[in-house]
């Protein structure tokens, strides 16, 4: 009776071992080729950090104007003018307005949001007045008016009221409050997007 070939010499066993070796090699190549590509990232121009995906930056810019503080104000503004004949003209008007302070997220630069090791670094544009036409003219009232006033005189009163409101409301304290709220809200936004460590600054 002819003896069976030893396992070392068995053709089927050699085939199985060869196939297993090839599968293992292919698996290693695939793992090495795909390692670290689960989250797509791109290096910034100076290679000092890593930019988040362009789609994420776009989604943040799409927020547009983000309000963090609104201050309501009313101003009493008057003007007088002398006349050659008769008594002086006088006008006094009350203006109401709401000044909204916040950030225009469309102003974020290309490298405003970057990864540094495990921390997302976010550099925000400055807090600013979001709407320069903040006076509600539908609520403007004439408190006292004597004589005839043309549109240019009323426009001058309107501009004077704007300056007074900006001086009264756009204070350092109010801007600091808006900045603090911006840091808090923007941090919360990126944490909700999955970033564990976020550093927001201006």
Image (spheres, rainbow, N blue to C red):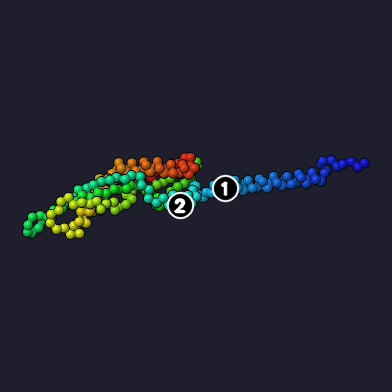
Residue at left 20%, top 54%?
Answer: 157
Residue at left 48%, top 51%?
Answer: 55
Q: From the viewer's perspective, tell me whether residue 21 is left or right of residue 151.
A: right
Q: Secondary structure at mark 2?
A: helix
Label 2 crowd bin: few (<14), some (14–19), many (20+), radius 10 Å: some
Residue 78 visible in the snapshot: no
Residue 54: mark: none
Residue marked by disc 2:
58
Residue 64 visible in the snapshot: yes
Label 1 crowd bin: few (<14), some (14–19), many (20+), radius 10 Å: few
Residue at left 40%, top 42%?
Answer: 185
Residue 154, percent across and down? 20, 56
Q: Secondary structure at mark 1?
A: loop
Residue marked by disc 1:
37
How many tags in the picture? 2
What quarter of the picture does the N terminus occupy?
A: top right
- Of residue 165 and residue 48, the one placed in the foreground of this image is 165
What quarter of the picture does the C terminus occupy?
A: top left
- Of residue 17 and residue 91, the one placed in the foreground of this image is 91
Residue 184, percent across and down? 40, 41
């Amino acid at each position: 009776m002819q003896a069976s070939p030893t396992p070392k010499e068995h053709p089927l066993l050699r085939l199985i071992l060869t196939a297993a070796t090839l599968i293992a090699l292919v698996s290693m190549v695939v793992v090495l080729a795909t390692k670290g590509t689960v989250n797509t990232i791109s290096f910034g121009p100076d290679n000092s950090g890593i930019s988040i995906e362009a789609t994420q930056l776009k989604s943040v810019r799409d927020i547009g104007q983000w309000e963090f503080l609104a201050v309501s104000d009313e101003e009493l503004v008057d003007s007088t003018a002398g006349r050659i004949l008769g008594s002086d003209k006088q006008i006094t008007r009350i203006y109401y307005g709401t000044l909204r302070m916040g950030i225009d997220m469309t102003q974020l630069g290309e490298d405003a949001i970057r990864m540094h090791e495990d921390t997302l670094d976010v550099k925000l544009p400055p807090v600013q007045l979001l709407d320069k036409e903040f006076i509600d003219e539908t609520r403007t009232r004439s408190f006292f008016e004597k004589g005839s006033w043309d549109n240019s005189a009323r426009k001058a009163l309107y501009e004077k009221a704007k300056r007074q409101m900006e001086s009264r409301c756009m204070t350092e304290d109010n801007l600091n409050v808006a900045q603090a709220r911006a840091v808090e809200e923007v941090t919360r936004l990126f944490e909700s997007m999955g970033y564990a460590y976020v550093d927001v600054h201006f």
